Amino acid sequence: MDQRLSIYRRLFAYLRPYPRQVLLAYGGMLFATLLNLLVPQVLKQAIDQGLASGSATALFVAGAIILGIAVVRGIAGYFNQYFGEWLSYRVSYDLRNDFFYAIQTLPFAFHDKAHTGDLMSRATGDISDTERFAGAGLIQLVSVIILTTGVLIAMFLNDAKLALLALGPIVALALVALRLGRVVEPMWRAIQIQMGILSTAMQESLTGIHVVKAFAREAHEFAKFDEENESWFAKRSGVIHTWGNHWPLFSFILSIGIFLMLWVGGPWVIAGEMTVGTLFAMISYLLMLNAPMQQLGNLVNLAATAGPSAGRVFEIVDTPNAIVERDGAVELDQVHGRVSFEAVSFAYPGNDRVLHDIDFTADAGQTIALIGPTGCGKSTVIALIARFYDPTAGRILIDGIDVRDVTLHSLRRHIGAVLQNPFLFSATIRENIAYGMPAAGDAAVVAAAKAANAHNFILHFPNGYDTHVGERGVTLSGGQKQRIAIARALLYDPRILILDDSTSSVDTETEHLIQQALDTLKHNRTTFIIAQRLLTLKGASCILVMDKGQIVERGAHEELLAVDGLYRQIYDLQLKDQEEYLLLEQRINQQAVTD
């Protein structure tokens, strides 16, 4: 219970920055509600002083007052409606910003486990459910409470004995509405969780649509989605069933109140103990509660939806960020590019160690290559440099400064990365290349594209650099996307360049051309390369051979070949036959020249 209240209090705190709009919305609601309470009193006077005494003037005055009340109530209702809706969408705007900011700032460790479909469900469906209650819904709920209180006070002022008869049904209505809220709240929480599962299933199926079609698994995907959709519908139907059972009960309880008033109040009027106008006013007040009390069921339903929905949003907003800047973190301005790993170990949360006591130093301008079996920790080493993760032991230094002692923005400003799976935004080729440097001119963009060997294929598109690449760069081949990603990193002009298997999606010829461009760009830049092809690594200053999270060999290409170790085994599988063939071909050519 305390947790639910804290969620609502936190949600309502989003109204605090807008006191003027809150005042106008709630002021309009309060004014309109109070004016509604006057109408039965005016009708009472019209009946008792106009109809009973035959005074046409009294009837005209009553009509004019009711007309005036309608005009003023309309103006107040405008403020209530307009600013109530404004608050709803403003809360949604602020909440969505907080949610998106949290997602953007959370580290890789969070996104490794999070499901995109579930996050999208929270960002859209959950926030939409929350906005309907936080602004206009809350105002309506307060209006119902004020109106109910006002009706009870007015009824007791008119006739206390008759009001006591009506009190029972009114209290019963409120209790039924509150019970409905307690019943449906956990049901709504289950619905929101199921919607996240459903969104995840859809997102995964759409993302992998090429695999689905390649293996002719459309029927399987539909059956899987239909199962989750059916589960969502069953949970949703349960809420509708519960809510539908309560709806007729509201009208029935109210009808009991009217029956009691006519049964008891009617004889009092006949006996002259009560005026007709008073009885009419009492029944009018009770009928005035009909729509609000039925609305109360909707509002309780809305509040029950908003609580779990807001809780799911706040769950992401409150997720602790494992990658935080220390107090007093400094700006990393001038970087030469010397990178040192000192006894670095790392383990993902809840898993065994991935890295064990990694020690090496890359001097400024050197090219460090990492090679080893899949899962040996190569990509993790690279990720630690940019603080995508923090080591569980040891430290990483850039120019002698611990990366945890500098601001994240200044650290990553000096690191350019081309990750293993290149991602392009649904924008133009020019915008994708200039993503890290949006102010870059056309000449700089073209130069980066040329360096990455992307310029020629870009010009083959009808719109050249203004070609839209579609979602995730779907209109480009794997090699083309990789070269655009390389151009993006090169335009960023970092002191430390990270290439995580960045030539994995290109053919040998393109790889050779990219390698030529990178050889020029490596001047005065520290470069880390992960690749499966030894041909890419041969010219590295130092090759780190990794296995099971440890560096098992290190040295230049020729040095490692002299050792009968893992590197030599990889070489024998990949390059030995090729190099021996090239050497034999050279000897034959030389012999032909001699002859």
Image (cartoon, rainbow, N blue to C red):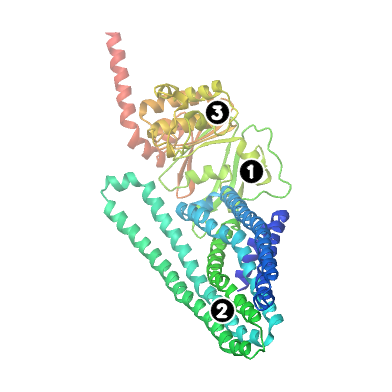
Q: Disc number at residue 491?
A: 3
What kind of element bears circle 3? helix
Front residue of 102/64: it is 64
Across and down, in percent, residue 415 comes to 58, 36
Across and down, in percent, residue 192 comes to 48, 63
Few, some or many C-alpha atoms within 10 Å of disc 2 (few <14, some 14-19, many ≥20)?
Answer: many
Few, some or many C-alpha atoms within 10 Å of disc 1 (few <14, some 14-19, many ≥20)?
Answer: many
Q: Earlier in the sequence, mark 2 or mark 3?
A: 2
C-alpha span from label 1 to label 3: 20 Å
Residue 523 versus residue 396 in the image, above or below: above
Residue beneath disc 2: 173
What kind of element bears circle 1? helix
Whether residue 541 is visible here, answered yes or no, is no
C-alpha span from label 1 to label 2: 57 Å
Whether residue 120 is visible here, answered yes or no, is yes
23 left or right, relative to 498: right
Across and down, in percent, residue 425 comes to 48, 37
Few, some or many C-alpha atoms within 10 Å of disc 3 (few <14, some 14-19, many ≥20)?
Answer: many
Disc 1 marks which amino acid? Leu
175 left or right, relative to 479: right
Front residue of 504/209: it is 209
Disc 3 marks which amino acid? Leu
Q: Disc number at residue 408?
A: 1
Residue at 53% across, 29% down = 490
